[in-house]
């Protein structure tokens, strides 16, 4: 996200709409990466819990 503001080429050649779209795209990607990690963590926990219940 900082790239749009820090890279002189991007600042000089991209209008505000393009910069906003890049920032929005990066934000959405970060959201889905975080959600994916959370889902995988919950799936692993549930899998371990089921395995532990079978062993008892």
Image (cartoon, rainbow, N blue to C red):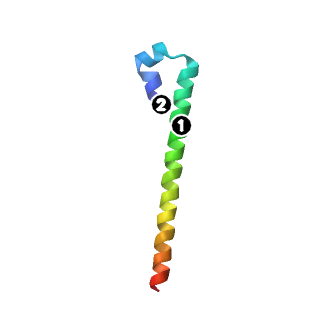
The answer to whether 56 is drawn above or below residue 47 in the figure is below
Residue 9 position in % (x across, y down): 42, 16
Helix, strand or loop at label 1? It is helix
Residue at figure coordinates x 56%, y 19% from the top left: 16
Disc 2 target residue:
1
> Local crowd at mark 2 within 10 Å, few (<14), some, or many (≥20)?
few
Residue at figure coordinates x 46%, y 77% from the top left: 51
The answer to whether 44 is drawn above or below residue 24 in the figure is below
Residue 56 position in % (x across, y down): 47, 86
Residue at figure coordinates x 48%, y 53% from the top left: 37
Disc 1 target residue:
27
Q: Which of marks 2 and 1 is nearer the N terminus?
A: 2
Farthest right residue?
Answer: 17
Query: 2 or 30: nearer the eye?
Result: 30
Q: Do the residues labelled 2 and 1 touch (CB within 8 Å)?
A: yes
Helix, strand or loop at label 2? It is loop
């Amino acid at each position: 996200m900082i790239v749009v503001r820090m890279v002189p080429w991007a600042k000089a050649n991209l209008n505000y709409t393009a910069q906003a779209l890049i920032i929005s795209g990066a934000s959405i990607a970060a959201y889905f990466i975080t959600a994916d990690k959370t889902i995988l963590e919950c799936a692993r926990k549930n899998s371990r819990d089921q395995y532990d219940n079978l062993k008892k």
